[in-house]
Amino acid sequence: MDDLPPGIRERLRALPAGLRGHIERVVVEARRLAAVHRMDAEQAERAAWLHDLLRATPGDELLALTERYGYQANEVQRRLPMLLHGPLAAELLRREYGERDPDVLDAVRWHTSGDPAMDGLPLLLFVADKVEPEKLRLHPGQDEVRELANRDLRAAALRYLELLEARLAAGLPPRGRGRQAAGALDPHAEATRAALEAAVRQRGRRT
């Protein structure tokens, strides 16, 4: 964290203790997965420190930031502004803190709902965010996602989205989302799931 701009370090220190704990656990998991998959551990750590910079921001403030940054939120994001914290954090980092690493920005942007084209660091952070120890404790079924992540990040991301979709369909939204989100994945997560499913299926045909 020492190489982050002072303003970002101050923002991180001001976050609620529980959220800081989550971020620290994601940092550890991101570095671990980077080592497993021979990726840049320092870059993975940086993205992990930054990914939830706006997670504690109230929904009305997130919606105000969409106007400030000209971000086009979809209907689900407007109903559930928490889904905006990644995309808006990426804008904040780029516009106000001078972050220029496109992979870090994409990783922060898509760590909640994913992106159909995500690969490399964005894919790693998406998975690391879902398999840190406290989330596994809250959702024991996600142990399978962590096991898959050691071999195949795409398969792990796909399995997470399948489990999430099943929970939503059962009326059991993940912790931190309101009941209004129950029933289906948000549109971006659904597109991500479909793209991952196609990629995993195609790779299976080649083996």
Image (cartoon, rainbow, N blue to C red):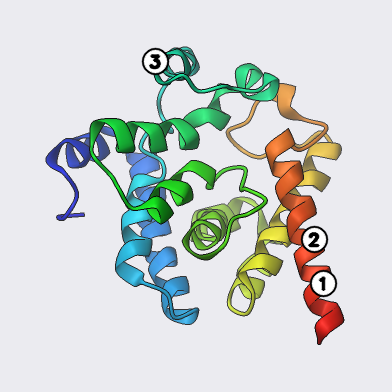
Whether residue 41 is visible to the viewer of this picture, yes or no, is yes
Q: Quadrant of the N terminus?
A: bottom left
Q: Which mark is residue 197?
A: 2
Secondary structure under tag 1 reads helix
Q: Which mark is residue 68?
A: 3
Q: Choose top left, top right, bottom left or bottom right for residue 144.
A: bottom right
Q: Is residue 47 above or below residue 156?
A: above
184 horizontally vs 102: left or right: right
In the image, residue 171 lies at what x, y percent? Answer: 82, 33
Q: Residues at badges 2 and 1 in contact (C-beta under 8 Å)?
A: no
What amino acid is at disc 1?
Gln
| Dot 3 or dot 1, earlier in sequence | 3
163 horizontally vs 42: left or right: right
| Dot 3 or dot 2, earlier in sequence | 3
Q: Nearer the viewer, residue 138 or 205?
A: 205
Residue annotated with mark 1: 202
Query: Rounded to the nearest whole Å, what is the CA distance between mark 2 and mark 1?
Result: 9 Å
Which residue sits at x=42%, y=75%? 39
